[in-house]
Image: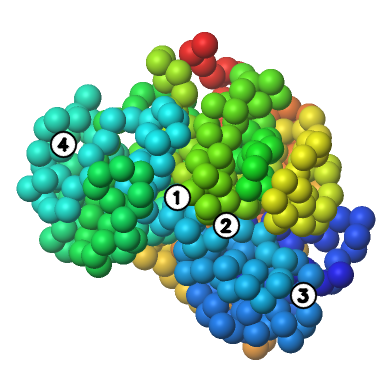
Amino acid sequence: MKVLVVGSGGREHALVRALARSPQRPELLCAPGNAGIASEARLLDIAVDDVEGIVAAVEREDVDLTVVGPEVPLVAGLIDALVERGRTAFGPSAGAAQLEGSKAYAKQAMEAAGVPTARWRRVQSLDEGIGAVSELASPGVVVKADGLAAGKGVTVAEDAEQARAALSEIFVERRFGGGHFGEVGFGAGGAGGSASPSAVVEELLVGEELSLLALCDGERAVPMAPARDFKRIYDGDRGPNTGGMGSYSPVAGIDTQRADDLVAQVHQPIVELMRAKNTPFHGVLYVGLMLTADGPKVLEFNVRFGDPETQAILPRLRSDLVELLMAASRLGGLQGKALEFSDDWSVTLVLAGAGYPASSSSGDVILGLDDVPAEVEITHAGTAQREDGAIVTAGGRVLNVTALGPTAEHARTTAYAAAQRISFDGMQLRRDIAAQADRDPLSIAP
């Protein structure tokens, strides 16, 4: 059996590792991969957004299952192109991927499905945005670029000045695209229709965050283990948002029953809505939740495995990932299936390069990889290998360090001790990941 993983980051490295643990012993390929994945899968030199190139490779290699990691090829229709050729592929169609491709589409889907979320407005100019800020601020607002922005197009604005600066980035500096989808069909006012920038302004929710992923087969959503991630670049949740600086799993207060209840309340209505719209959702539906005093409310949808949550979740998975992803690719294929996870705690640290998230440094030699204990999992995110064999930085988020343990503190201590053995110029590392994971239970409204 051949399995192709599409992507080049830490999430894809974690997927390769988990797929390799399958009893089916698949032959693994990755396009384009990175320096770490190269030792565990055969790399194909194809960019993630080269839909035609990936489809051609799948047919040439006679791949049995294609697993798409990042959002860009999903929104670009890679799954559609593979399915049209009779190939099994894990991930949503371009139509279903609009749940991540457009923030406004996602918000309208939540309203149509009865999924709780923050009050919001879609705006298409700086003036509209400033008006929405005045209406929704309580005490602050969140400003989101409507289109894909690699996890960086979100600003938590605590006052009107910060909100105006974020809106200016979208409408004046035009740093982020948006509005490239057509009418969404959830009622009056579609999510797009032009290439001009657009944004979503929503009220700032207060509570505890939770990442809850579910495998979906077009009919049902099956929960994975809960996780929590850390978006801000600096300790204490300060500084700009990033793609994620660390994560841990499980999450105190979210037992199996609570996770099932949340999936029934949030994921399942979206799966049913998308099927009713003739765009059944296959793949992973990632839901970022805020557990507020008024109950859980959705912050965002992603239509793929989260990064770095995947790096913390998959090492705990005891089920056969190949079997699960194949099943999710068929309508109703997950019926009767449940995911099994170990009782271990898992803590993932992200080692980022100099200048991240505003910029990234490349070519800095990474030292100490061979000094990390074997029981600690190192996944490569932004790395490359020079001709002399040296591993160097090649992206903003460079490496992930994941450790397991019987307690959160054990896993955390092990992960930080391993991270101390690694170094490269300008390395950034938050020091407070999972600091209170099992000592500060979430306060969850009934």
The quadrant the N terminus occupies is bottom right
Is the residue under label 1 in contact with that under label 2 (CB below 8 Å)? yes
Q: Which mark, by number, is residue 99? A: 1
Q: Is residue 122 above or below residue 253?
A: below
Q: Which residue is mark 2?
A: 92
Q: Is residue 167 above or below residue 4?
A: above
Specify the amino acid type for callout 4.
Val
Residue 333 image offset from top left, x and y in percent: 76, 48
In screen coordinates, is 338 left or right of 50? right
- Element at label 2: loop
Q: Which comes sooner in the sequence, label 1 or label 4? A: 1
Coloring basis for residues = rainbow
Q: In this rendering, does residue 234 appear at all?
A: no
Q: Which residue is mark 3?
A: 63
Q: Which comes sooner in the sequence, label 4 or label 2? A: 2
> Residue 389 versus residue 44: which sits nearer the camera?
44
Residue 54 image offset from top left, x and y in percent: 62, 79
Measured Cα–Cα span from mark 2 to mark 3: 18 Å
Q: Which mark, by number, is residue 133? A: 4
Is the residue under label 2 in contact with that under label 4 (CB below 8 Å)? no
Residue 286 image offset from top left, x and y in percent: 55, 44
